Image (cartoon, rainbow, N blue to C red):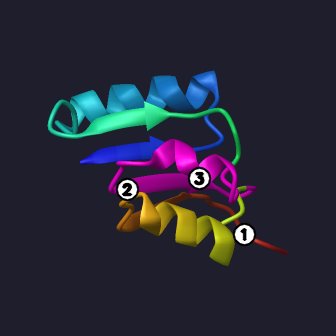
Amino acid sequence: MQIAFFSSHSYDIESMERIAKEQGVTPAHELKFFTPRLDATSAKLAEGCEGVCIFVNDVADEAALRVLAAGGTKAMFLRCAGFDM
């Protein structure tokens, strides 16, 4: 499976690649990292990726989801943690 990561920074790439290697995720799965936020325009970058991983500021609205689905995306993973007080 190819997994596209949106809103990627150098520290995201470094940690995800390290963890993927340690956990045996790669080379069975290919990780692709993109700097732009996910939106209806940037979603095309994930064409051919069965999975996408987005961050809290990405826009996974109907328009973006339609582009992702048309490009073959079947699963979405979220990079978010925290709490509201």
Please tell me whether residue 20 belongs to the stretch shown in magenta: no
Front one among 19 and 60: 60
Kindly identify which residue carries mark 1: 83
Q: Residue at coordinates 55% horizontally, 49% vertically from top-left? A: 44
Image coordinates for residue 71, horizontal then vertical, percent: 42, 57
Kindly identify which residue carries mark 3: 43
Tag count in the figure? 3
Image-based side of 48 in relation to 14, left or right: left
The answer to whether residue 61 of the structure is visible from this angle is: no
Q: Nearer the viewer, mark 3 or mark 1?
A: 3
Q: Residue at coordinates 46% horizontally, 29% vertically from top-left? A: 15
Which numbered dot is residue 51?
A: 2
Q: Three-letter amino acid code at disc 2?
A: Gly
> Which element type, helix, strand or loop, lies under badge 2?
strand
Q: Decide which of tag 3 and tag 2 comes sooner along the chain.
A: 3
Q: Is residue 14 above or below residue 33?
A: above
Q: Residue at coordinates 15% horizontally, 38% vertically from top-left? A: 28
Q: Decide which of tag 1 and tag 2 comes sooner along the chain.
A: 2
Q: For the residue carrying disc 1, how many other residues have a C-alpha within 10 Å: few (<14), some (14-19), or many (20+)?
A: few
Q: Which residues are magenta?
A: 38-57
Front one among 45 and 83: 45
Classify residue 66 by image quadrant.
Answer: bottom right
